[in-house]
Amino acid sequence: GAVVSQHPSWVICKSGTSVKIECRSLDFQATTMFWYRQFPKQSLMLMATSNEGSKATYEQGVEKDKFLINHASLTLSTLTVTSAHPEDSSFYICSASKTGDGAFFGQGTRLTVV
Amino acid sequence: DAKTTQPPSMDCAEGRAANLPCNHSTISGNEYVYWYRQIHSQGPQYIIHGLKNNETNEMASLIITEDRKSSTLILPHATLRDTAVYYCIVRVADSNYQLIWGAGTKLIIKP
């Protein structure tokens, strides 16, 4: 199967700082990547769809100025949580679509804002 | 909203076959059935997908009813490491459409 690597796997940051999460497709090119957020005991909630070379499409209720997404290449997308606050603490997951095989997921990033 | 419904939880004895049902009565002709699972604090893992024929791989088997309105994921010999939340999702293949996640089934394998 295809491999998607997400980094870091966990991060603790101070309130008001920014955190960048990277998502890489290691053995395939992904024109589209997705970013999800998951709170404890809940299912994955789509935050945004990221297309290589264009602006991300955000789901309703997700602040695009707070969650900055960059998809500069076919193998890398980044999510930056700006001015993080404790309520942004969550499990963030990226996925990349591989044509014909569906979507493959990173291992997730546990963000804790203190 | 998710286009699938699954039981919230199931138990299965270790070594037995685990059969996880999924209803997708509004599935369209070009939508595939995908199964993923998520072990605690990890990203979802792809298991299997199918359109209308039954499928089998090294992880599981997928049985799709003839009318395609429901399917069953079968883990033939469940182990403790198969304890996870299992998600059934319908999606158009060869597309970049996002996955719509339901609540899934929490499968607990008991020794």
Image (tube, coloured by chain):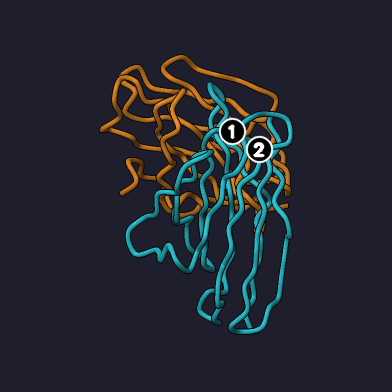
Chain colours: A cyan, B orange
Residue at 58% in and 49% down:
A94
Q: Mark 1 and mark 2 in contact (Cβ < 8 Å)? A: yes
- Report the quarter where the N terminus of chain A lies: top right
Q: Amino acid at mark 1?
A: Ala
Q: Position of residue B64 (x, y in %)?
A: 43, 23
Q: Secondary structure at mark 2?
A: loop
In the rendered structure, the residue with mark 1 lies on which chain?
A: A
**Residue on which the image places disc 2:** A75
Residue at 63% in and 30% down:
A29
Can marks 2 and 1 be said to lie on one chain?
yes
**Residue on which the image places disc 1:** A30
Work out whether residue B17 or residue A85 is closer to the camera in this orientation and state it: A85
Residue A101 left/right relative to A26: left
Q: Amino acid at mark 2?
A: Thr
Work out whether residue B10 or residue B1 is closer to the camera in this orientation and state it: B1
Q: Earlier in the sequence, mark 2 or mark 1?
A: 1
Q: Position of residue A88 (x, y in %)?
A: 53, 74
